[in-house]
Image (spheres, grey):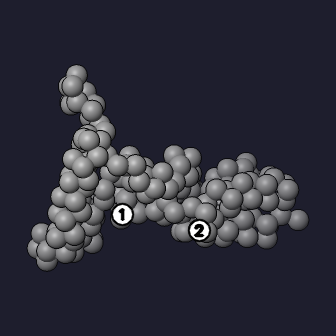
Amino acid sequence: MKQDLGPHGNMENIVFVVCANKIDCTKHRCVDESEGRLWAESKGFLYFETSAQTGEGINEMFQTFYASIVDLCDNGGKRPITNSSASFTKEQADTIRRIRNSKDSWDMLGVKPGASRDEVNKAYRKLAVLLHPDKCVAPGSEDAFKAVVNARTALLKNIK
């Protein structure tokens, strides 16, 4: 994207909006909401779920988009610093993606099959601290945390 902006382009003076369209057609969805939201917010972009057919999300998207442009102008052409763009880390986003794409409980916790009870618990604690819903607001963190809890429970049942 930076290349497309040319030598005078600056990512700080552009408002980006990512719109998931056709949200009324859930069976045709290629990217689920949490994955799209996670990607957009990790880049500092606004994210909206929209439907041209029903009009859902359209007004909210345009109002927020225009308000963001006004804020940009009021701030000397730079995006105002907001807490939402720094609300979660790249490590949290990458970990959520890895958990979503894991093949099994071992892979989810990042331990090798046959790992000891202590290794499973250590890996669990590291992920729990990173993804606990009280500390992490990244989209999908709650589901990832639940998956990690379930993976630990399943693995510990089978370890003597």
Position of 149 with respect to 66 (left or right) is: right
Coordinates of residue 34 in the picture (x, y in percent): 41, 63
Q: Which residue is denoted by mark 2 in the rendering?
A: 133
Q: Residue furthest bottom?
A: 54
Name the amino acid type tagged 2: Pro
> In this rendering, does residue 87 appear at all?
yes
In the picture, the disc for residue 123 is none
Q: Residue furthest left?
A: 53
In this rendered view, identify the residue nearer to me: 76 or 40: 76
Q: Which residue is denoted by mark 1 in the rendering?
A: 32
Coordinates of residue 30 in the picture (x, y in percent): 29, 59
Q: Residue shown at 72%/50% (left/top)?
A: 111
In this rendered view, identify the residue nearer to me: 113 or 83: 83
In this rendered view, identify the residue nearer to me: 29 or 81: 81
The reply to whether dot 1 and dot 2 touch (C-beta < 8 Å) is: no
Position of 105 with respect to 77 (left or right) is: right
Q: Residue shown at 26%/67% (left/top)?
A: 49
Secondary structure at badge 2 equals loop
